Image (cartoon, helix red, strand yellow):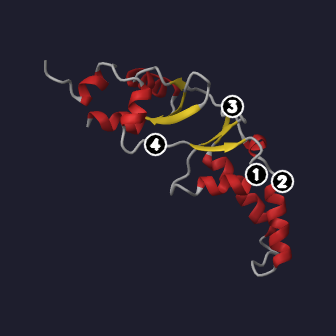
């Protein structure tokens, strides 16, 4: 019996998201921070990718608690910098210390919003595409049976499998 192609498995829904995330190269990795991580730590995670993306917030058990849209993090950092620009000098350690102190007082749990939609890793790509389309989203966090985020599926990733 002839081996089915990757595209055949994808189009017939035989691949679960768990399989897809393992087999996909490169798999999109979610950006994750803890509830108590501060704005500086969150910003460090955000700049690991060249484009603004959603950052997912997890509790100590790794369970998804919320998300910080890239524009929300950018606006928070901009507000911090903008409020101090008129007097800020990067060479003044006291001013830099004040700015850092403000930034570390803002935690991820105070910036996060609820995650509107998720999908579990046993669902298939067709189901993910339906959810993305009808929810008007461009990406979904993929959760395992413990509500831990194991990946992100983007509409772009699914479409690229067919073109």
Residue at (86%, 75%) from the top-left corner?
A: 94
Residue at (56%, 26%) from the top-left corner?
A: 118
Whichever of labels 3 and 1 marks the residue nearer the N terminus, that label is 1
Disc 2 secondary structure class:
loop
Whichever of labels 3 and 4 marks the residue nearer the N terminus, that label is 4
Q: CA distance from mark 3 to mark 2?
A: 21 Å
Asked whether disc 3 touches disc 2, contact meaning CB atoms under 8 Å apart, the reply is no
The quadrant of the image that shows the N terminus is top left
**In x, y percent, where is residue 29?**
50, 43
Foreground of the two, 14 or 135: 14
Q: Which residue is mark 1?
A: 38
Q: Residues within 10 Å of mark 4 (few under 14, many from 20)?
A: few
Asked whether disc 3 touches disc 1, contact meaning CB atoms under 8 Å apart, the reply is no
Disc 4 secondary structure class:
loop
Q: Which residue is mark 4?
A: 28
Foreground of the two, 160 or 149: 149
Whichever of labels 3 and 2 marks the residue nearer the N terminus, that label is 2
**In x, y percent, where is residue 19?**
39, 28
Asked whether disc 2 touches disc 1, contact meaning CB atoms under 8 Å apart, the reply is yes
Whichever of labels 4 and 2 marks the residue nearer the N terminus, that label is 4
Of the two numbered discs 3 and 2 in the rendering, the one whose residue sits closer to the viewer: 2
Is residue 138 shown to the viewer in this render? Answer: no
Q: CA distance from mark 3 to mark 1?
A: 18 Å
**In the image as oriented, which residue stretches furthest toward the bottom?**
91
Q: Which mark is residue 105?
A: 2
Whichever of labels 2 and 1 marks the residue nearer the N terminus, that label is 1
**In x, y percent, where is residue 70?**
61, 48
Of the two numbered discs 3 and 4 in the rendering, the one whose residue sits closer to the viewer: 4
Q: Residues within 10 Å of mark 2 (few under 14, many from 20)?
A: some
Residue at (78%, 47%) from the top-left corner?
A: 107
Q: Which mark is residue 114?
A: 3
């Amino acid at each position: 019996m002839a081996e089915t192609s990757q595209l055949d498995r994808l189009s017939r829904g035989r691949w679960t998201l768990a399989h897809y995330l393992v087999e996909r190269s490169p798999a999109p990795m979610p950006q994750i921070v803890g509830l108590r991580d501060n704005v500086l730590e969150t910003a460090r995670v955000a700049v690991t990718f060249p484009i603004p993306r959603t950052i997912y917030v997890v509790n100590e058990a790794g369970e998804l608690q919320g998300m910080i849209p890239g524009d929300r993090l950018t606006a928070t950092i901009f507000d911090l910098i903008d409020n101090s620009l008129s007097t800020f000098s990067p060479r003044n350690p006291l001013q830099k210390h004040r700015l850092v102190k403000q930034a570390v007082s803002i935690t991820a749990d105070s910036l996060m919003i609820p995650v509107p939609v998720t999908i579990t890793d046993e669902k298939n790509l067709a189901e993910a595409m339906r959810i993305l389309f009808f929810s008007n989203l461009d990406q979904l966090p993929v959760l395992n049976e413990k509500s831990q985020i194991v990946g992100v599926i983007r509409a772009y990733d699914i479409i690229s499998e067919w073109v």
